Image (cartoon, rainbow, N blue to C red):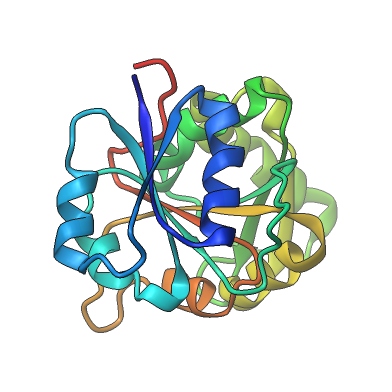
Amino acid sequence: MNTIVVRMSETAFAVAAALAKVTDAEVVSVPADISAEEFARALADPDVLLGVMTRAHGPWMIAQRSAVPLVVVPPETSGDYALERVLVPLDGTEEAAQAISETVRLFCSAGIEITVLHVFDQNTAPAHWDQAAHARPAWEREFHARICAPYLPASCRTVTLRSGAPGDHILDLSTDHSDLIVLGWSQHLSQGRARTVRHTLSAATVPVLLLPAQAGVNAGQ
């Protein structure tokens, strides 16, 4: 039986319960005052599908060590939390798309609304993007062929495009239009790494699901 381990609080348990409905998993709670080391050991059990904890408990050590996905719950989360809309930011790399692929397929099959977001910055905007009549359609075809088609279900391939700082747009879209943010990441926090993950996790007003590279939420396994 798959289990979701929650470091106990009212809001964290509500999020875990909503995820359990999607994944057909059992929620197992551990005390709120458990140490980070003890929680990490609990997540290492082979039956554990993912972990859930509040941001107040300090998620970074767990997030870096855990081989299973971790959901971090902000204080604004309601005790009657419902999971209906998910925001999936993609940086345009196949590694990021592969990291979130199985989880997005699971959410799509459960009827959850998926918004895929890609944000350009000054380093990633395609050449001649100002020639919108030609550049945008060509870029979208390439992005769908390289990122969406191999990794996302056909019903979840509409991409929302923004330009600027990725973290800012993630927070802006998630505030009123999402119940969960899904981020694939490398689990590296060295200088200059994971800037978007850091920014999102520190300021998001909805729960954030961190998916380690090569990990995903796989119900029924």
Which residue is found at the position 29% from the left and 43% from the top? Answer: 68
Question: Quarter of the image containing the N terminus?
Answer: top left
Question: Quarter of the image containing the C terminus?
Answer: top left
Q: Nearer the viewer, residue 123 or 149?
A: 149
Q: Using the image, determine if residue 87 lies above or below residue 34.
A: above
Percent x, y for residue 184? 41, 51
Q: Using the image, determine if residue 135 lies above or below residue 202.
A: above
Q: Is residue 127 visible?
A: no
Q: Using the image, determine if residue 47 lies above or below residue 122.
A: above
Left or right, residue 183 beside residue 181: left
Percent x, y for residue 148? 58, 33
Left or right, residue 101 beside residue 128: left
Q: Is residue 207 visible?
A: yes
Which residue is found at the position 53% from the left and 33% from the top? Answer: 20
Farthest-out residue, bottom: 191
Which residue is found at the position 14% from the left and 63% from the top? Answer: 37
Q: Nearer the viewer, residue 117 or 61?
A: 61
Farthest-out residue, right: 133
Which residue is found at the position 80% from the left and 57% from the top? Answer: 177
Percent x, y for residue 112? 72, 33
